Image (cartoon, grey):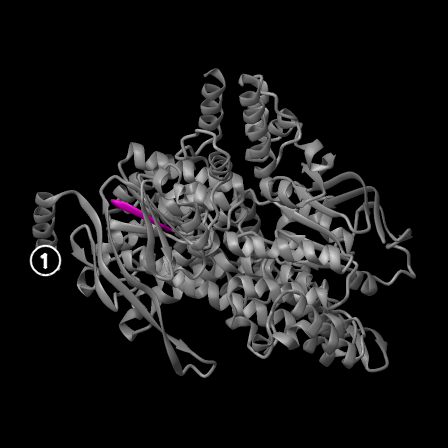
Amino acid sequence: MIRDITIGQYYAADSPIHRLDARVKIVVTLVYMVSLFTFQDFAGYAAAILFFGIVLALSKVPFSYIMRGLKPVLFILLLTGMLNLFWTPGKEIFAWGVVAVTWEGIRKMIYITLRLALLILGASIMTFTTTPNQLTAGLERLLRPLKIFRVPVHEVAMMMSIALRFIPILVEETDRIMKAQAARGADFESGNAFQRMKSMLPVLVPLFVSAIRRAGELALAMDSRCYHGGEGRTKMYPLRYRGRDIFGYLCCLVYIAALAVTVRISPF
Amino acid sequence: MSIRLENVFYIYGKGTKEETCALKKINLTIEKNEFVGIIGHTGSGKSTLLRLLNGLERATEGSVYYNGKNIYDKDFSMKTLRGKVGLVFQYPEHQLFEETVIKDVQFGPANMGMTPLETELFAFQALKDVGIGEELIDVSPFLLSGGQKRRVALAGVLAMKPEVLALDEPVAGLDPEGKENIFALLKRLQKERDLTILFVSHSMEDIAEYADRVIVMNQGEIVLDGEPHKVFRYQKELGQIGLDVPVSAKIANSLREKGFAIPGDCITVDETADAVIRWYQDRKRGAV
Amino acid sequence: MRSGGLKVLWRRIMQKKKEAVLIETKDLAHEYGRRDENGDVTGIVRAIDGISLTVRAGDFVTVLGANGSGKSTFARHLNALLHPTEGVVYVDGIDTSEEEMTLAVRQTAGMVFQNPDNQIISNVVEEDVAFGPENMGVPSLEIKKRVAESLAQVGMQKYRHHSPNHLSGGQKQRIAIAGIMAMHPKCIVLDEATAMLDPAGRRQVLETLHRLNREEGITILLITHYMEEAAEADAVYVLKQGKIALAGRPETVFGESDKIKDCGLALPDVSRIVQKLNNAGLPIDKRILTPEKLTEALGRLAAE
């Protein structure tokens, strides 16, 4: 189950997309996601799919690999698709009691499912091609203006990267604790929902105790390595825009322009 | 009581590109009341082997028999097996969760479906066995020292009245005194409670000192299995897989190579020291 | 900040004049409040109680002690993570209780902790090594240079772009050491950094430490309960209940078998054999610590 979630995972490869500055990827992804809500027609979807296809091809992430990211949300995709298929009023093709399949329904189903899928795929191509550290560094830099409003940008970014480091450790630890309790006859599978929740207590308590201990030790280790907040801190790889990053932004602009044109002249 | 493994394979992530064979064709019989040490590098499959014994991990191929019954049979109760083969994990922190020591120790027997009276009785007995005094039974397990936590975790398994005790690195990280106490306790349990004991260790010296039988694992396979005095004769073979023999055995072996009249089965401090002393006294007597 | 810098400079000059003492503690004591479950103080524990010792620059010093002997508390004083209840600690001439000098202390005496997982901050090895210098405000190019250097010093340059999650315990501890080396310290304090490792990992870490000590002149203060790790040290201190119970060269300390046992420690097997031979009247030098030396000595005895 946990293994199926590919969102947030990194796919190591050397590609033009991997080499882009994280800020470019964050901004373009956001723009792309917003753009998905600006059209309702075939031409818009064609442009969006084309843009995604080009990025995917450039990124060297295998098609099957990125599609795995849709697996955990398959149910939601199907459900929304179905709802739209059956509950959209319009020209009926087929009716069965209260539910009716209409031409409008079919179109809406395809568009909504496509939109959701592209949203997820767009976000995953960003995380696949950007290490968590680059991602947090990019976010930190992009959100820096918020510091004026006393938003602890550096601290939040630091917390994010530490969380990313410790999630796999805690997942593994949960597995070990569950095994240790199972060795004492603990049963996590049978019983009703309430009983099952209760049976997780012997797992959650050691897990929390351990997480708190780890946090304490980590804080000490950070202290001893001269950590004192973001003030006066330098970076080994400071973010600096290069030619290719400007090119990245330009490509995004071209996509927006193409979208604007196609949406306008689209017959639908 | 006996445990038998027949042609056991254990494969992680089958079908993925990270497919690894943690155990390869393991054939093994453990008899009642044995004290077995399992040794090997990190990743040699020794922890997986322990987890197979109580059904916590399921062999990808092959069968495990407990008292002659196949534990993968449909009518075999895994729950009972978990109670019969008590598995103690390396870090007590992974299992202690109750408010008090006594409540924590009762968790296992209660899960086994014992009556409240039995549960309480066995928990008290187990705590007494591991040497946790009455003054500590109502204390939170989180306030105990490292050595005490380990004893309470052990008691939590003992309270299920197992016939076999399988321990994953029971003394790792303990100081010498804590280590000696745990081994003395295990030896006593083997004798007085008639338990069969298996332990995984990284220390050749501990195995030489305490185990009656040693199983050497390398890359998922059993490479040597037998009485420690016999197994540690294979210094060269062990060296090839990056394992040492106990320091005492090393000394005895290199003395023998130098032509000293020292028997080939010295693996502990006492045995080597006694052999050298005997050699010295013989020589002195010869000179006189 | 500026006056702080001058202060260090002045102290360093004064120090050089005296002798090359890197760490000095005088009557160091530390008390903890013992708390019950509600967090109320119910008693006072004196975790360390009057420790006075000096470590010369370039030495390899081992501090031994059983659980609860106060050795970790002692370590934390050297890194200004704790401040003395009584007494003083000087690290390279700086009094660790001076708050504005904390970062200077931590940079001079870097610290490696017990649990390898809980001291690696980043998802990528090189970024973790860079963490210290980044905090110190070292310029980017210089950080890159230092990261490459320190990874080479611990023999982990191959893993530069790896995630720490798939490394062995010994490798993780070497990354932690590299992270300290990148801060260009004079001394590394290791607080039971080998306790959670398998024998192979322990060997890796010890070899790395001895090499750094020999080749880079880094002062090492190794805190452990494994006596074998003290065999090649320049000086050994044994702690018991917060006090120094034994001190001296390893050969001398290892000879005191009764006291060692009394401190909850165990002599290495070689020393135990030597001791038994001595008791039986064999004339073997009781300072012998390695199997090779022992067989040599017995060979000489046989030749007589």
**Does residue A238 sit above or below B259 in this rendering?**
below
For the question of whether residue A256 can be seen, the reply is: yes
Provide residue C123's location: percent of width, then percent of height: 46, 51
- Camera-nearest residue between A223 and C255: C255
- Camera-nearest residue between B53 and A54: B53
**Side (left or right) of C245 relative to C184:** right
Provide residue C235's location: percent of width, then percent of height: 31, 42
**Side (left or right) of B65 relative to B155:** right
**Quarter of the figure with the C terminus of chain A:** bottom right
Provide residue C108's location: percent of width, then percent of height: 24, 50
Q: Is residue C189 magenta?
A: yes
Residue in view at x 77 percent, y 62 percent = B162
**Side (left or right) of A46 relative to C172:** right
Provide residue B46's location: percent of width, then percent of height: 68, 45
**Does residue A65 sit above or below C210 in this rendering?**
below
Q: What segment is highlighted magenta in the picture?
A: C185-190
Q: Chain of mark 1?
A: C
The residue identified by callout 1 is C2
